[in-house]
Image: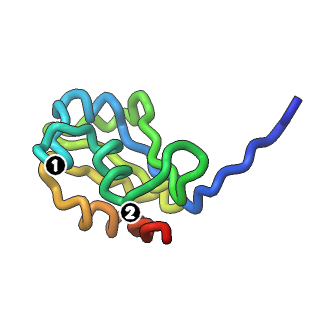
């Protein structure tokens, strides 16, 4: 039985699923996607462990702001970001230290 599994992630970002549900999407094209999915798509990340970074929805981070989603970069866990629906995904990615994945040749 394996005791470890490898991933290609250089960073891990936690997104509060409860906050995402409360704001009812509001991100991505048309403003109908949850933040985690919109960020993954915007950055062109592969699914699961094969991506360059992991954007993971967690049940609740316990902050519960009004009309915003709590996001934490695992590498800089002292700063928690509050992202409002309709926020520019480039600015969100920059604040989290994430970069877009270059297209494959």
Circle 1/circle 2 CB separation < 8 Å: no
Residue 100 in the image: x percent, y percent? Answer: 39, 67
The reply, left or right, for residue 48 in relation to residue 25 is: right
Front-lying residue, 1 or 60: 1
* Dot 1: element: helix
* Dot 2: element: helix
Q: Residue at x 39, y 57 (%)?
A: 44
Residue 88 in the image: x percent, y percent? Answer: 18, 61
State whether residue 70 is above or below residue 58: below
State whether residue 62 is above or below residue 50: above
Nearer the observer: mark 1 or 2; the answer is 1
Residue under circle 1? 29
Front-lying residue, 85 or 39: 39
Tell me, yes or no, if residue 82 can be seen here. Answer: yes
Density class for disc 2 (Cα within 10 Å; few <14, some 14-19, many ≥20) is many
The reply, left or right, for residue 11 in relation to residue 5 is: left
Residue under circle 2? 96
Q: How many marks?
A: 2
**Which sits earlier in the primary sequence, circle 1 or circle 2?**
1
Q: Residue at x 33, y 69 (%)?
A: 94
Q: Quadrant of the N terminus?
A: top right
Front-lying residue, 87 or 81: 87
Q: Residue at x 55, y 43 (%)?
A: 48
Cα gap from disc 1 to disc 2, whole angstroms: 20 Å
As drawn, the residue found furthest toward the front would be 105
State whether residue 96 is above or below residue 70: below
């Amino acid at each position: 039985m394996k005791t470890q599994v490898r991933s290609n992630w250089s960073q891990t970002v936690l997104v509060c699923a409860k906050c995402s549900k409360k704001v009812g999407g509001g991100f991505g094209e048309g403003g109908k996607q949850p933040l985690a999915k919109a960020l993954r798509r915007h950055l062109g990340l592969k699914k699961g462990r094969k991506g360059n970074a992991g954007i993971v929805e967690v049940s609740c981070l316990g902050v519960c702001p009004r009309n915003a989603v709590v996001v934490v970069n695992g590498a800089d866990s002292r700063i928690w970001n509050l992202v409002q629906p309709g926020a520019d995904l480039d600015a969100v990615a920059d604040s989290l230290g994430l970069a877009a994945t270059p297209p494959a040749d």
